[in-house]
Amino acid sequence: MSFIYLFFSFMLSPLPEIILPKNQWISLSQTHFRYATNGQEAPQSTLVKLKADDDYLYIDFECQQNPYWNQNSYKEHNSEMWNRKYLNCLLPPGEDTPIHYLELEINPNNALFVGWIDNPTKEAPQKLTFVPYKEAKIKHEVKTLENQWSGQMQIPWALLGGKKNTYRLNFYRIVSLTSYPS
């Protein structure tokens, strides 16, 4: 049986460790992300499940309590999606704080952002290299409901430079609790 060790940075210390058996969904026990500003738990639930096989890392997610998801105007891949609601995933291999990693963002419009980030200072990214949408070969879909949106991504190990034994994942979510001006 094949395993992948995953470390999730939800501003928790020590980092939670999850072992992913091959072809088996594992749900994250942390269902509420934490505010980046103060580390306190956010009230909105975010459910994440993971699975791995020989070709892909699968991420299944549900972003709950998201009343204004439909005001997201970004529909083009590799656009400035960080300005509106999205789910973000950083995928560096290894256990150490990364200096080079893949950043993925997906939004309620099923638009995808894929880029390699260089962060040699470990404080502020210095360089972004976009991965063209068709070259990324990420399979993805999004579903929307009244107050939430959900989806799934299949990320090819080839995009990450091949399958490694350990990854330190960081999930991030943007939620707006007020309506945007027209």
Image: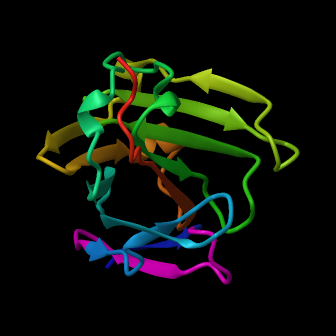
Q: Is residue 18 magenta?
A: yes
Residue 152 falls left or right of residue 117 = left
Q: Nearer the viewer, residue 106 or 71?
A: 71
Residue 180 position, x and y percent, is 39, 28
Q: Is residue 170 magenta?
A: no
Residue 36 falls left or right of residue 141 = right
Q: Is residue 19 above or below residue 180?
A: below
Q: Nearer the viewer, residue 178 or 75?
A: 178
Image quarter of residue 28: bottom left
- Give the residues in magenta: 10-25
Q: Nearer the viewer, residue 128 or 3?
A: 128
* Residue most extreme to the right: 121
Residue 13 position, x and y percent, is 67, 81
User: In this view of the protein, can residue 26 be seen by the observer?
Assistant: yes
Identify the main secondary structure in magenta. loop
Residue 133 position, x and y percent, is 38, 21
User: In this view of the protein, can residue 110 be seen by the observer?
Assistant: no
Query: Residue shown at 35%/16% (left/top)?
Result: 76
Q: Is residue 178 above or below residue 50?
A: above
Q: Is residue 43 above or below residue 104?
A: below
Residue 18 position, x and y percent, is 45, 79
Query: Residue shown at 35%/17% (left/top)?
Result: 182
